[in-house]
Image (cartoon, helix red, strand yellow):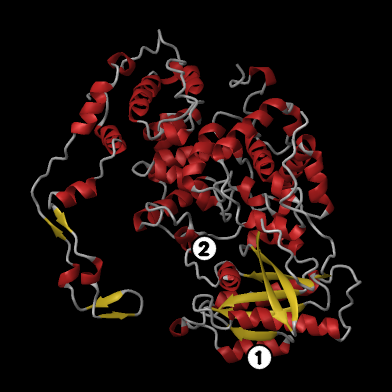
């Protein structure tokens, strides 16, 4: 583990939600590693990724929670929403059913996060134009109606992936700047950088079993 | 050589360093063109190639070709014949329990004479059926010869021949509610493995999972069932009925009720017991993790839901399950503790951010250490501490002193 003192001013917690197989983990990999893994294993529970980005000259560390999409895991994944500053809600433009479920994902996102959480709608797999099942305009209208920002992306080609993550961060940052997001409140999903200096990597391995 | 089946001989032959493809290439039975000469003129969409078809033709000669076996014969000649003819009555299970038995399983699996000896010995015990079950369990605690794993596992899981009879009556063709999910999940299950990414393996894995769902109407498909079924599919590639029986017995023993539609009570209890035991063996670590709200729900669900099948690569998984199958249903918890112990140096100073990343791409764990630590914890922690209400039918009392590894 690297203990280099990355300079960042904030940590933002993101959560990625949406039906299974829409490409949540692929979006995460594309964003954090700029790679497309076509046979990325499905997620059980939750997996994580981080990346440091820059918004208005400030370095921000994104802590991204990539959740399991299978309906059955909802009982578990609901506990992961708490304290998310941004929620990326993903559907697959080639499968209408994943779009139809958005309202239930949105309900969860609204109920389980705080009012300032920025919710971003992503239509993934935009590279498969030929198999499109959900028109752009329809999704755009849904997004406008519910006050969401919307982009179509492709985790495969990388198109718009960067923008969706960055745009979400910009909105959160804006909320901090104009005071609508109170950093002192609980569970905002934004942590100002801890001034804690760590000496990790230096601590010798201690005996860890007292039995 | 008559002691071995053809498949076993082929396995030993390969262990001697032989490689079919190289030999065939050398003898001009197959011919390869340099990759640059096989390039097509045009590629459209995904891999539709046009032009230069001739360059991509695969040349083989149709004659029968005998593979040379001189290395293997030489190797056999160097082995003490008495070792290849052990008596399971007189020599006992500890025969040749020398430096070799305690080597790591990876070293042992590459050792031709050791494998030859072990195969004969374990096969003898297997052929003795239930009469040598105790001796078999004793000897496979050292290792299971890879070629015999598909016979040893059913024996450890106490599969009876009648358990495999119903498989052929199952209709795995018709549509099932889980079909859509399986179609999504199977093509991304352990795809780094050559066999697992073949269409034939995809099809068999789907059949196996569907057969299991059909015989267990009380359970539903949870993501993770695919990874769990994979080892049984691989071992019983030509005999899915046996694979199905093994999977059924395995889940009944280790994952009772985990795949109920609502399994929250079972998972919750499991993780709580795990956290308690972590506190028991390493209070400092648990305190550190709890202080930053890093709870087992964030990292341990895929471990226990799939008995590590989702998180370990297949070659490690086989070795872990070799040991797991000799122990009761609480063993996975101790494996979890062993993993925590191995990650401890990084975890104890980690911030929440470091910790989540550490688990997201689990570093290359040393499996032999994990196994040794699991056995250590398993033998030291009082059995009552790992009691679970949802454990399912009792699998026999575990008595601390009787632990087979303590000598």
Quadrant in which the N terminus of chain A appears:
bottom right
How many angstroms separate mark 1 from mark 2 (CA)? 31 Å
Q: Can residue B399 be seen in this view?
A: yes
Residue drawn 67% across and 26% down? B379
Mark 1 or mark 2, earlier in chain: 2
Query: Which residue is denoted by mark 1 in the rendering?
Result: A141
Query: Which residue is denoted by mark 2 in the rendering?
Result: A40
Q: What element carries label 1?
A: helix
Q: Where is residue B308 in the image (x, y as percent from the top left)?
A: 58, 45
Of badges 1 and 2, the one in the foreground is: 2
Q: What element carries label 2?
A: loop
Quadrant in which the C terminus of chain A appears:
top right
Q: Is residue B229 left or right of residue B58?
A: right
The chain letter for the residue carrying disc 1 is A
Image: B27 above or below A122: above
Residue drawn 18% across and 76% down? B52
Residue drawn 77% across and 73% down? A85
Q: Is residue B373 left or right of residue A34?
A: right
Total marks shown come to 2
């Amino acid at each position: 583990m690297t203990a280099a003192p990355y300079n960042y001013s904030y940590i933002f917690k993101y959560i990625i939600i949406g039906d299974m197989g829409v490409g949540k983990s692929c979006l995460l990999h594309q964003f954090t590693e700029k790679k497309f893994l076509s046979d990325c294993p499905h997620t059980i529970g939750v997996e994580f990724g981080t990346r440091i980005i820059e918004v208005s000259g400030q370095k921000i560390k994104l802590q991204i929670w990539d959740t399991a999409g299978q309906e059955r895991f909802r009982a578990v994944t609901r506990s992961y929403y708490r304290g998310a500053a941004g929620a990326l809600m993903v559907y697959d433009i080639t499968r209408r059913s994943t779009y139809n479920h958005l309202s239930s994902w949105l309900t969860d996102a609204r109920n389980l996060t705080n009012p300032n959480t920025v919710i971003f709608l992503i239509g993934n797999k935009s590279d498969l134009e030929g198999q499109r099942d959900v028109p752009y305009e329809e999704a755009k209208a849904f997004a406008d109606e519910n006050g969401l920002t919307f982009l179509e992306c492709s985790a495969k080609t990388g198109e718009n992936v960067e923008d969706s993550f960055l745009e979400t961060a910009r909105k959160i940052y804006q909320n901090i700047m104009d005071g609508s997001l109170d950093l002192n409140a609980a569970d905002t999903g934004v942590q100002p950088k801890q001034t804690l200096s760590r000496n990790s990597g230096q601590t010798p391995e201690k005996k860890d079993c007292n039995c | 050589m008559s002691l071995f089946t053809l498949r076993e001989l082929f396995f030993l032959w390969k262990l001697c360093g032989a490689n079919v493809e190289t030999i065939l290439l050398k003898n001009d039975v197959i011919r390869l063109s340099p990759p640059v000469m096989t390039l097509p003129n045009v590629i459209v969409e995904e891999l539709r190639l046009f032009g230069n078809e001739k360059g991509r033709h695969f040349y083989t000669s149709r004659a029968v070709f005998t593979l040379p076996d001189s290395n293997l014969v030489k190797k056999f000649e160097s082995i003490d014949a008495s070792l290849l003819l052990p008596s399971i009555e007189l020599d006992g299970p500890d025969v040749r329990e020398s430096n070799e038995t305690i080597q790591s399983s990876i070293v042992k699996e590459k050792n031709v004479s050791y494998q030859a000896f072990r195969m004969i010995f374990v096969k003898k015990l297997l052929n003795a059926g239930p009469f040598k079950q105790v001796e078999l369990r004793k000897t496979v605690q050292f290792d299971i010869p890879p070629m015999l794993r598909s016979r040893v596992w059913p024996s450890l899981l106490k599969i009876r021949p009648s358990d495999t009879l119903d498989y052929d009556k199952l209709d795995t063709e018709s549509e099932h509610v889980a079909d859509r999910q399986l179609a999504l999940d199977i093509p991304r299950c352990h795809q780094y493995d050559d066999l697992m990414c073949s269409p034939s393996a995809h099809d068999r894995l789907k059949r196996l999972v569907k057969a299991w769902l059909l015989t267990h109407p009380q359970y539903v498909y949870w993501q993770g069932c695919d990874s769990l079924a994979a080892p049984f599919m691989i071992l019983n590639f030509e005999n899915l009925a046996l694979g199905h029986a093994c999977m059924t017995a395995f889940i009944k023993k280790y994952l009772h009720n985990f795949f109920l539609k609502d399994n929250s009570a079972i998972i919750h209890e499991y993780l709580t017991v795990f956290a308690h035991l972590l506190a028991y063996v390493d209070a400092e670590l648990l305190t550190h993790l709890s202080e930053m709200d890093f709870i087992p729900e964030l990292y341990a669900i895929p471990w226990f839901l799939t008995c590590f099948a989702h998180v370990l690569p297949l070659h490690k998984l086989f070795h872990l399950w070799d040991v797991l199958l000799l122990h009761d249903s609480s063993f996975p918890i101790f494996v979890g503790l062993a993993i925590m112990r191995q990650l401890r140096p990084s975890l104890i100073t980690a911030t929440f951010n470091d910790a989540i990343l550490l688990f997201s791409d689990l570093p290359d764990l040393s499996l032999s250490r994990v196994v040794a630590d699991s056995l250590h914890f398993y033998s030291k922690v009082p059995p009552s501490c790992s009691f679970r209400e949802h454990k399912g039918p009792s699998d026999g009392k575990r008595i601390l002193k009787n632990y087979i590894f303590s000598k």
